[in-house]
């Protein structure tokens, strides 16, 4: 599911706390952005139409909750970035950050640990194809 950067900001509010009414989402985002109330309500409607959030009637208002989880969205975004920029391969991504000095000793240790775990995993569960 594709969501825009602006929609992701609305999702972030709902991932942090839900359910929320539109007025509560507007209040949070108005403090973080210069968006007007109609803009935020339009973003809520777009997310509703995409199935990323759901609305439940609560008296005279609707309460919004995420359907799309943060974990699922992060997975989609990272997979898309990996495909677009590195042809779906992880090694060039790691090399990119390594060449620019972006990997700390802790990052390198964590990568080594993950690679060791992948080597121990049964075939077909994340190992063997360079990803």
Image (cartoon, helix red, strand yellow):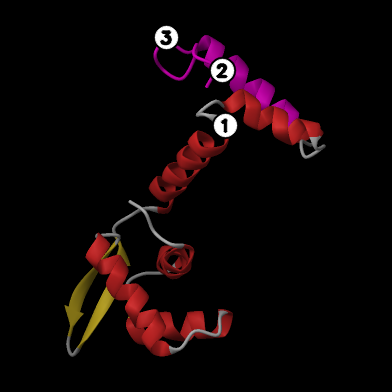
Judged from the image, the secondary structure of the residue bearing numbered disc 2 is helix
Near mark 3 (Cα within 10 A), the count class, few <14, some 14-19 or many ≥20, is: few
Judged from the image, the secondary structure of the residue bearing numbered disc 1 is helix
Check disc 2 and report the residue beneath it. Answer: 117
Judging depth in this view, the residue of 41 and 87 nearest the camera is: 87
Residue 23, quarter of picture: bottom left
Which one is in front in this view, the residue at disc 3 or the one at disc 2? 3
Check disc 3 and report the residue beneath it. Answer: 123
Distance Cα–Cα, label 1 vs label 2: 23 Å
Q: In this rendering, would 110 be left or right of 76?
A: right
Near mark 2 (Cα within 10 A), the count class, few <14, some 14-19 or many ≥20, is: few
- Magenta segment, which residues? 107-131
Q: In this rendering, would 96 be left or right of 101?
A: left
Q: Position of residue 1 (x, y in %)?
A: 33, 51
Which one is in front in this view, the residue at disc 1 or the one at disc 2? 1
Q: Position of residue 82 (x, y in %)?
A: 53, 36
Residue at coordinates 55% horizontally, 85% vertically from top-left?
A: 34
Q: Position of residue 11 (x, y in %)?
A: 41, 65
Residue at coordinates 40% horizontally, 80% vertically from top-left?
A: 40
Near mark 1 (Cα within 10 A), the count class, few <14, some 14-19 or many ≥20, is: some
Which one is earlier in the sequence, the residue at label 1 or at label 2?
1
Which one is in front in this view, the residue at disc 3 or the one at disc 1? 1
Which one is earlier in the sequence, the residue at label 3 or at label 1?
1
């Amino acid at each position: 599911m594709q969501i825009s950067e602006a929609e992701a900001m609305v999702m972030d509010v709902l991932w942090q706390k839900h359910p929320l009414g539109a007025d509560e989402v507007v209040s949070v985002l108005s403090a973080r952005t210069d968006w007007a109330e109609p803009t935020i309500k339009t973003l809520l409607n777009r997310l509703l139409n995409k199935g990323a959030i759901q609305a439940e009637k609560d008296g005279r208002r609707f309460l919004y909750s995420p359907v799309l989880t943060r974990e699922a969205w992060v997975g989609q975004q990272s997979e898309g970035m990996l495909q677009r920029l590195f042809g779906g391969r992880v090694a060039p991504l790691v090399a990119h950050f390594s060449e620019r000095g972006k990997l700390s000793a802790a990052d390198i240790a964590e990568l080594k640990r993950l690679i060791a775990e992948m080597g121990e995993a049964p075939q077909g569960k994340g190992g063997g194809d360079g990803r």
